Image (cartoon, rainbow, N blue to C red):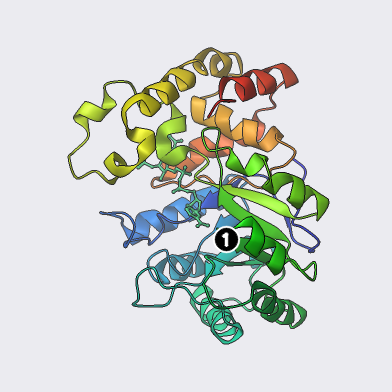
Amino acid sequence: MAEIRIGHSQVYAEQLGLGANAIGGHNLFANLKDETGKEVVRTALQNGINLIDTAYAYGNGRSEELIGEVLQENEFDRSRVIIATKAAHVPGQKGVFNNSPEFLTRSVEEALRRLQTDYIDIFYIHFPDKETPKNEAVAALHKLKEAGKIRAIGVSNFSMTQLKEANQDGYVDVVEDKFSLIHREAEKERWPYLEQHNISFVPYFPLASGLLTGKYHLNSLQSMAPDDPRKKNPDFQGERFEKIIQAVEQLAPIAKNNQASIAQLVLAWYMKNPRISVVIPGAKKPEQVRDNARALDIHLSSTDYHTIDQLFKDF
Ligand code: NAP
């Protein structure tokens, strides 16, 4: 599989990465074990995945620490791993973000320390704040890029207006936003802008938190615990849930023809999509990441690609 260039940077990555919010993300998921998280990272790197997508917000730095520890192991060569991390969350203040040059510069230094490395391949502003002009925030990252501390500049969860302001000087290499077969808003306005400005796109929630793996069925909601956080997710409610399950069920014969699981088929669809640079499915268990890595060997025909596209066109 050819490596993909990230924006105008010198970062090249495989098309399949690992989303690491469940690696040390104790504030996001219950019952996570650090050692299992480290094994998920090792399994990814041993199976052809070379980009790890983390953030300060995943465990308030714990995810970065665990990834840093794995990269110290003899088996792994730092120069072959693409580390993407993010910052903006103000420690100890839920839902408060800071994009000021001082905050971002300090955040990069702290992430370098936790990751035990001297450069970050992709650094994203995780969420926009209300105060900082976005071109000033990105200018601070450009300085860090010139100093060799980061290699590519990203923004995440920005509105179109914020993105345009951030990219005023043409410094943005990559955008990470919510996108999946069932969340396709980015296609309308965002993708044409990104294409025009040579900015890469990394979708998050590619498996729609597991909905697009085929493991849920129409009666799955009944067996879900009342306090399961997915119950608050509109994708897991009423008619929308039923419509998604029905569309996912139609993937089964296409997956079978490709000797793939539904999750692998969905990941292969993203990898064939010319507007998507790197797909970063999350995983909580080594076997999930091993399963997802097999998507690297699936080469979808154009017919299958378009059939899947049409099945999910209305979402
Ligand atoms: P996701 O990729 O849509 O779903 C991942 C979840 O699906 C896993 O935790 C696992 O959950 C299940 N799963 C994965 N592979 C599977 C397989 N082969 N078979 C069955 N189930 C499987 O959602 P996500 O992990 O929340 O998001 C992906 C990544 O995007 C994150 O890790 C993070 O790096 C990034 N992200 C970024 C932002 C941002 O603001 N920039 C926001 C959210 C996420 P279960 O075992 O519980 O089913």
Q: Is residue 8 above or below residue 120?
A: above
Q: Amino acid at mark 1?
A: Glu
Helix, strand, or loop for circle 1? loop
Image quarter for residue 235?
top left
Residue 111 location (% of width, % of height)? 53, 76
Residue 77 visible here: no
Q: Nearer the viewer, residue 242 or 77?
A: 242
Residue 222 visible here: yes
Image quarter for residue 7?
bottom right
Residue 18 location (% of width, % of height)? 54, 50
Q: In the image, what residue occupies the spot 64% across and 18% down? A: 307
Work out which residue is located at the far left of the displayed protein and give it.
Answer: 226
Q: In the image, what residue occupies the spot 53% across and 80% down? A: 107
Q: In the image, what residue occupies the spot 50% across and 16% down? A: 252
Q: Nearer the viewer, residue 122 or 153?
A: 153
In which quadrant will I find the N terminus? top right
Q: Nearer the viewer, residue 247 or 254?
A: 247
Residue 63 location (% of width, % of height)? 43, 65
Q: Nearer the viewer, residue 212 or 264?
A: 212
Q: Circle 1: is it few (<14), some (14-19), or many (20+) Cα within 10 Å? A: few
Residue where numbered disc 1 is placed: 75
